[in-house]
Amino acid sequence: MRYDRRMDQGLVLEPIGIVRSPFSERVDAPRQPRAAEGVRGSIELFEGRHFEDALSDLESWEYIWVLFWFHLNDGWRPKVQPPRSHVRRGTFATRAPHRPNPLGLSVVKLERVEDLRLDILNVDMLDGTPVVDIKPYVAYTDSIPEAGNGWLDTEAGAAPGDPVERWAVEIEELAAAQLRFLVDEHGIDLESRIVETLSLGPLPHAYRRIKREGDGFRLAIKDWRVHFRVGGRQVRVLRLSSGYRPAQLTRPDPALDAHRGLVERFGAAG
């Protein structure tokens, strides 16, 4: 079939609202709604476009599909390496955000509709994400249990509810104390992110920011470094450290307070 570029004239896409979520950067966002279980957010629709009427009866549905635009992505890649794959896969065989048209699709739980605001649960989208459409999730037609898991079934042994066998993650005493310190003193919670990332696999991977370090490994989460070792199918998280060099921590920047605090309490090497 030949492509007629005159078709472009009919492809008009305008956002209908934006997402409000606790995730501000791409590295923060869960890879799937399953990994965002319990995360609350909202969709704020734009005024003056009769969306109040369009929302009629939506609250009768427990789950909704949200179609959105990956607004922070530049360009696309024909092949990508998903977090659950050991090899590169064709983009159309994945949920990767790097697509010819960066459209995303997530199913979220609808908790409440109030005016032009939708309160939602299990949010995996970034704050400020443009929403292009909302549809009800219809269980009898949208769920196909016998559909299978594609190439995911070839990655590892099947596990209940997840085709990829997850790794066991153990937080050792020092790392646990550091994580408690960051939460109690600075309101920074890294544990769920660490466990979710490492449970998918501890080996170096393009998306998981893991590197070898001596006889162990190091995971980067934003400006933090997580040091761990692997035995069998178990990951032992040993300690955390700052991603900043000592000279950088001397800068009078309040954003570095948590890093300075970790070093003062536990030492530069954790």
Image: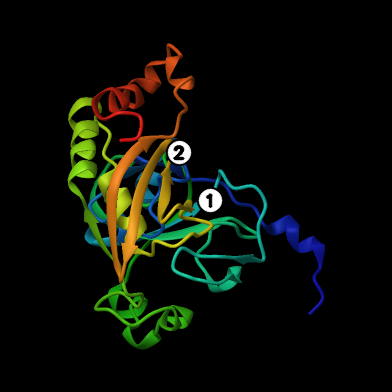
The N terminus, quarter of image? bottom right
The residue beneath circle 1 is: 69
Q: Nearer the viewer, residue 219 or 269?
A: 269
The residue beneath circle 2 is: 128
State left or right for residue 26 relative to residue 123: right
Residue type for callout 1? Trp
Q: Position of residue 53 (x, y in %)?
A: 36, 48
Residue 3, quarter of the rendered image: bottom right
First in residue order: circle 1 vs circle 2: 1
Outermost residue on the top side: it is 252
Specify whether residue 37 is in view.
Answer: yes
Query: Residue at point 43% right, 20% down?
Result: 249
Residue 255, quarter of the rendered image: top left
State left or right for residue 182 relative to residue 6: left
Residue type for callout 2? Gly
Query: Residue at point 37% right, 52% down?
Result: 124
